Amino acid sequence: MTGGPLSGLTVVEIASLAPAPFGCMILADLGADVIRVERAGDGGSGLMAPSGVLDRGRRSIAVNLRTPEGLEAVLALVESADILVEGFRPGVAERLGIGPDDCLSRNPGLIYGRMTGWGQDGPLAARAGHDINYIALAGALEPIGRAGERPVPPLNLLGDFGGGGLMLTMGILAALHERSRSGRGQVVDASMVDGAALLTAFVHGMNAAGLWQEGRGQNVLDGAAAFYDTYECADGLHVAVGCVEPHFYGELLDVLGLSGEDLPLQYDLDAAPELKKRLAEVFATRPRDEWAALFADSDACVSPVLSPWEAHEHPHNKERETFVEVGGIRQPAPAPRFSRTPAPVPRPAPRPGQDTDAILAQAGYDAAGIEHLRSAGAVE
């Protein structure tokens, strides 16, 4: 077992919520040594998810950045780090003394990752917001939902994680690649609005080609089509149907016993409600898992709709070990997979500040220096 493809990289993560921790979780999963700088004095309260899943794989130091000694301790960590990640509103890191200029002056090769909702500039840069606000402005929320109904928030997957933490990580890795040629660090400005907008690229292409109808629930991929939707089964659970191609749709009809029936044409969206009714009547005759078994060896593109708490039980996920148990909590395994440098099973999230002394020693502090920091209230 190796330490993963990012083994040897050091990340200083300034504690924050959701998107930046998700990005740093990915870096830690893939082998980077992620040092999470917690706020001394609050035990990390309010900054960690209740289960700590997003905070797995880290080491933790608790620092009071508002003391000169605490600030210097963080800058000492920065000197030997490859990456720093912060998720403050624009200007806050600068006021704390750990902005890009402060850190790059100590380490010109540093990749400085900034995670915000609105970005570092623009009229809304200083405003508060959450995932739902960012994806609304990006044009990613409006198309999601049923015809004639309100837009439906897709959890916080598009802004916090897809458009946020994942894009942040991609930007950091791109900057690391560039540094390997130039030897110079730079700032990565990751905005959830920018990232969520990027995720809509396919929809923009469809619209430009005249293949997208205005309004929710009017298109093949947003629930208008009978062959791309979910259906309730006899037990109240659901299956997902996605047989876009005609030959896959033919397999769907074969398994459902509807081949040869007088049905509307597959792509006639005007007649889709009638076709949906016919499909719904058949799916309602058996429980979900019976349908899953019937479609298991088919290319009809039918899958059981599993909850996050049962997905680990599916045979495919079991065989691929898509979920692992870390610290007694079942959670998604690191992804993607690597043939030569596989990622190890993550370590549980640390207690806030549990590695303070070891991290300070790594930064060059001796026992007397660590005790001075502690007595000054700079670390816990």
Image (cartoon, rainbow, N blue to C red):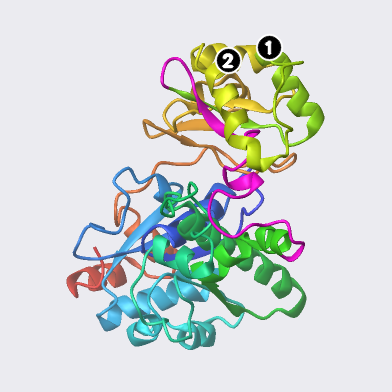
Q: Main secondary structure of the magenta part?
A: loop
| Residue on which disc 1 sits | 257
x and y, in percent, of residue 106 in the image? 51, 84
x and y, in percent, of residue 25 in the image? 49, 52
The residue lying toward the viewer, choosing from 376 and 13, is 13
Q: Magenta span covers which residues?
A: 208-236
Q: Mark 2: which secondary structure?
A: helix
The answer to whether 67 is drawn above or below residue 210 in the figure is below
CA gap between label 2 and label 1 equals: 13 Å
Q: Residues within 10 Å of mark 2 (few under 14, many from 20)?
A: many
Residue 218 counted in the magenta span: yes
| Residue on which disc 2 sits | 291
Give the side of residue 175 with respect to residue 45, left or right: right
Q: Quadrant of the C terminus?
A: bottom left
Residue 35, picture quadrant: bottom left
Say which mark, if any, is on residue 98.
Answer: none
Q: Mark 1: which secondary structure?
A: loop
* Residue that protrudes farthest toward the right in the picture: 247
Give the side of residue 271 with respect to residue 309, left or right: right
